[in-house]
Image (cartoon, rainbow, N blue to C red):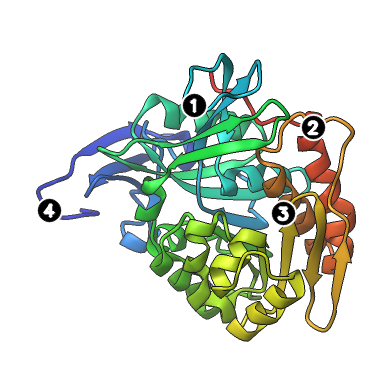
Amino acid sequence: MLYRGTNFFIRFFESAKHGKGSVSLACKVQGRIMIANDSDTSPTAAKQANSDGLPNHSDKQPVVLIAGALVVDDIAIPEENLVIGASNPVRWESRTGGVAANVARVVAQQHSVSLIAAIGEDVIGRQLCHALQNAGVSIDPVAFSQQATGRYSAILDKSSELFIGLAQTQINEHLSWLDIKARFPQTGIKAIVVDANLNEQCINETLQGVSEMDISAIPTKIALAVSPAKASRLKTAASTIDILFCNRAEAAALTNLNQQSTLNTFAQALQTLGFKRFIITDGAHPMLVQDINSAEMINAPSVQHIHTVNGAGDAFAGGTINAFLIGQVLSKAARDSGRAAAQEILSGMLTAPLIR
């Protein structure tokens, strides 16, 4: 028996993944759907599955493992200038979103990617998984019963800038290091990326646990600050993070400095906390790229007409990661690949898959 206890059920099904005629077990334990082959019933060999009970493993070993938020982005595009305190006519779009998922879609353009994310046992969760798989991302979701898949509502203004963002992403805080470790590739990976939608304990245990695993090479550990409200979750893991992506407001939250401080002031404070390499973006203003022994200011990506800013920062991180992993120094990776990826989002050349 894979798991013992009263709150579980077992469903047998034929699984071509494990070879013709073999049997897999799908068990629901404490609200999670787990899956294991009958040839290996150890808990650490268990693989989480989607809400249909089917595994989502790519035949190709991932080079980059990404853990964090997968949500549906509900985007309100206004027809006129927004009027506070009044009804405003808008056009709604629902697309795949979440910081980790957005980064994964860009990284998947050049590397094999596996995304670990929490979803609810609902239609939206399944639609998001299918959309990402069609975009080339291998996803290993952890499905939680009695939880709704994450949702982010972005209200844009007439110039396509973010007016206000509303996030319901608490489900991501249920993920743990055990969820991530259970599906860690046996061959190892080049990089692991975590976003601050994960809880602080998960972030710390994951980054520390990866360093202690018996693998051929310790992967580059990358963190995404997500928002000022969540950025501080990365503070205690600073010394284990190889590259941090944050913006001005998130840097202020991490360092407890005034948001109007200079980027150099933020950089010094982040180094004092233990961060080694990092990029601090500043909207349309130049960003600061801090490498081990040098710092450089780089112009922000720009386009003639902004289609949307939603996801542009995540695309920048994904493009930078792509180039860094093939050997480019951080500043060049950000200047060339990072900015190019962000410009594709800003211009509308690249859009997240629609959820219908």
- In the image, what residue occupies the spot 83% across and 40% down? 343
* Local secondary structure at mark 2: loop
- In the image, what residue occupies the spot 48% across and 59% down? 230
Look at discs 1 and 3 and give the one toward the viewer.
Answer: 3
Look at discs 4 and 1 and give the one toward the viewer.
Answer: 1
Give me the C-alpha separation between circle 2 and circle 4.
Answer: 54 Å
What residue does disc 1 label?
Answer: 127
Residue 313 appearing in the image? yes
What residue does disc 2 label?
Answer: 306
| Disc 3 residue type (three-letter) | Ala
Give me the C-alpha separation between circle 3 and circle 2.
Answer: 19 Å
Mark toward the start of the polypeptide (4 vs 1): 4
What residue does disc 4 label?
Answer: 5
Residue 60 appearing in the image? no
* Local secondary structure at mark 1: helix
2 and 1 marks in contact (CB < 8 Å): no
Q: Is residue 297 above or below residue 336?
A: below
Give me the C-alpha separation between circle 1 and circle 3.
Answer: 25 Å
Mark toward the start of the polypeptide (3 vs 2): 2
Label 1 Cα crowd, 10 Å radius (few <14 / some 14-19 / many 20+): some
Q: Is residue 18 above or below residue 278?
A: above
